[in-house]
């Protein structure tokens, strides 16, 4: 099937062509016709399937008719999404696909100044893409006028529920005109999502592409069984492989992400971190550096990484085994996107075996076990790892074996000062055989998740007396 058979507006088709898309993905082929026909829609699709374009393209087609002649003054479309990062990604998509339309678009989310957002709402910007929390706040203060609204999209509805946005969403939707088209996208169709669809939608059509328990077919999954104390050493060892040039590493907790990043840096691996304790600017910089190749590794927590859409991620590494099986599918969905082939690597310690079995049941298949070639599984690693320089005579490692540094003497050959496998800037390279994400005007960097919303999936430990030092994997 070609895009031109779907009935999209010629200006939208032109933009799709310029984005390099040759044919619609399955969710696009299934969702675009009923949306264009005016139906409410439930789209069950995991991230990486092209679901953003699945709702954006038909919505822009329908908006083209009203914004084209300048008649439309008020806000006619609202997209709600769980995280700032996802909001910005949707904006990037909308701007790319709507670049030949006189469409005004604005974003609304917390953690940044509200004045531009208030101005955009007051000006009746055609399309608003928002996180529910900040939008609710501004609506309560009567800055928004949605009396002209015709289209509502709830993207990643399951995640919005997970993050506790239901009350805000209910309040927002209650104040919208009842006569509208409502599109709901979710990775799963749970009871809660069904309740939501009954509440907000009218006779919706359902399109379902794959099940959430099916990781993308293009992802090669591997398990490395490794003692907890050797996880960092194993990661450093694997990162010597030149193909691992753009690696997203997951830890369960924020402080574990920071600690791992420091350890990788100590081993000469340029690393950035993405989690909610980092400031907005730090997070933006981390993503920018990762995308441009200034750093080759991005260490992230689950919620912070939600919705990351960076082309060309070569590998996802589950340094800490995911806490929920669904998180596994989300995590590894960061690679193998849009037909690119990527590898998902999970470190499994003896403590993780039960969770691994549960995961294999969930995804309905076993995951191949691999042993890292040339890695010394018998090495002894000092138990306590400090960030500050330590005297070799100090600490528990001395009682356990020779002090070889935290990577067990496996020094990374990379230069700390430059990227080991330089790659061209993302904007300029052919990406995924032409299936790359379109870049909006200024190549605006993507933003990660809202700090104050994150943490639901992360465990917090009471702070320990400093004499504890820092230890490996205090899960
Ligand atoms: P999404 O599931 O919306 O996050 O999209 C995942 C990736 O697929 C993004 O990088 C999109 O730019 C890309 N994409 C969307 N539609 C297509 C298409 N028809 N052909 C190739 N890539 C696409």
Image (cartoon, grey):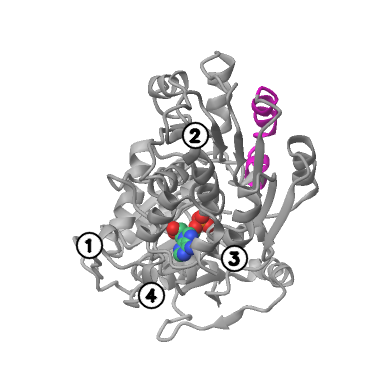
Residue 407 visible to the viewer: no
| Residue 111 in the image, given as x and y percentages of width and height | 44, 29
In space, the residues marked 3 and 4 are separated at their CA atoms by: 38 Å
- Name the disc covering residue 26, or none: 3
The N terminus, quarter of image:
bottom right
Where disc 2 sits, the SS reads: helix
Judge the density around disc 2: few (<14), some (14-19), many (≥20) Cα neighbours within 10 Å: some
Q: Nearer the viewer, mark 1 or mark 3?
A: 3
Q: Nearer the viewer, mark 2 or mark 3?
A: 2
In space, the residues marked 4 and 2 are separated at their CA atoms by: 57 Å
Q: Nearer the viewer, mark 1 or mark 2?
A: 2
Q: Nearer the viewer, residue 267 or 189?
A: 189
In space, the residues marked 2 and 3 are separated at their CA atoms by: 28 Å
In space, the residues marked 1 and 3 are separated at their CA atoms by: 43 Å
- Name the disc covering residue 237, or none: 4
The C terminus, quarter of image:
bottom right
Of helix, strand and loop, which mostly describes the magenta segment? helix
| Residue 425 in the image, given as x and y percentages of width and height | 25, 60
Question: 170 left or right of 431?
Answer: right
User: Quick one: label 4 or label 1, which is nearer the N terminus?
Assistant: 4
Residue 171 sits inside the magenta stretch: yes
The residue segment tinted magenta is 158-175
Residue indicated by mark 2: 66
The residue under the point 44% across, 69% down is 315
Where disc 1 sits, the SS reads: loop
- Name the disc covering residue 416, or none: 1
In space, the residues marked 1 and 2 are separated at their CA atoms by: 54 Å
The residue under the point 25% across, 70% down is 421
The residue under the point 71% across, 72% down is 357
């Amino acid at each position: 099937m070609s895009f031109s058979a779907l009935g999209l507006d010629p200006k939208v088709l032109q933009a799709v062509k310029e984005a390099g898309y040759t044919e619609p993905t399955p969710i696009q082929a299934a969702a675009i016709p009923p949306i264009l026909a005016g139906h409410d829609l439930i789209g069950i699709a995991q991230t990486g399937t092209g679901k953003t374009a699945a709702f954006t393209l038909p919505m822009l087609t329908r908006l083209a008719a009203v914004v084209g002649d300048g008649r439309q003054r008020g806000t006619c479309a609202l997209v709600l999404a769980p995280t700032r990062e996802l909001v910005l990604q949707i904006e990037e998509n909308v701007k790319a696909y709507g670049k030949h339309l006189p469409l005004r678009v604005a974003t609304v989310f917390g953690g940044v100044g509200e004045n531009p957002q208030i101005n955009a709402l007051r000006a009746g910007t055609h399309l608003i893409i928002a996180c529910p929390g900040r939008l609710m706040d501004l609506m309560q203060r009567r800055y928004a006028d949605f009396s002209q609204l015709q289209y509502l999209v709830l993207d990643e509805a399951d995640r919005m529920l997970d993050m506790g946005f239901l009350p805000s969403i209910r309040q927002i939707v209650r104040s919208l005109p009842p006569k509208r088209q409502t599109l709901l996208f979710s990775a799963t169709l749970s009871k809660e999502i069904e309740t939501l669809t009954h509440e907000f939608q009218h006779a919706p059509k359902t399109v379902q592409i794959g099940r959430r328990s099916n990781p993308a077919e293009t992802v090669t999954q591997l398990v490395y069984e490794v003692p907890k104390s050797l996880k960092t050493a194993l990661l450093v060892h694997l990162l010597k492989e030149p193909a691992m040039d753009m690696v997203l590493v997951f830890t369960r907790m924020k402080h574990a992400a920071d600690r791992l990043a420091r350890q990788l840096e100590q081993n000469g691996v340029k690393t950035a971190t993405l989690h909610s304790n980092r400031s907005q600017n730090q997070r933006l910089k981390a993503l920018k550096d990762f995308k441009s190749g200034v750093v080759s590794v991005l260490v992230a927590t689950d919620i912070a990484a939600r919705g990351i859409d960076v082309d060309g991620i070569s590998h996802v590494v589950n340094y800490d085994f995911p806490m929920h099986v669904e998180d596994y599918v989300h995590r590894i969905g960061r690679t193998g996107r849009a037909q690119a082939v990527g590898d998902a690597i999970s470190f499994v310690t003896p403590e993780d075996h039960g969770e691994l079995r549960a995961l294999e049941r969930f995804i309905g298949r076993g995951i191949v076990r691999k042993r890292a070639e040339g890695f010394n599984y018998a090495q002894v690693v000092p138990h306590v790892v400090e960030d500050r320089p330590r005297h070799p005579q100090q600490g528990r490692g001395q009682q356990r074996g020779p002090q070889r540094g935290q990577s067990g003497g496996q020094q990374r050959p990379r230069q700390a000062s430059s990227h080991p496998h330089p790659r061209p800037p993302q904007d300029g390279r052919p990406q995924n055989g032409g299936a790359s994400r379109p870049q909006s005007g200024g190549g605006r960097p993507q933003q990660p998740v809202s700090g104050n919303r994150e943490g639901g999936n992360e465990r917090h430990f009471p702070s320990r007396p400093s004499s504890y030092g820092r230890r490996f994997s205090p899960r």
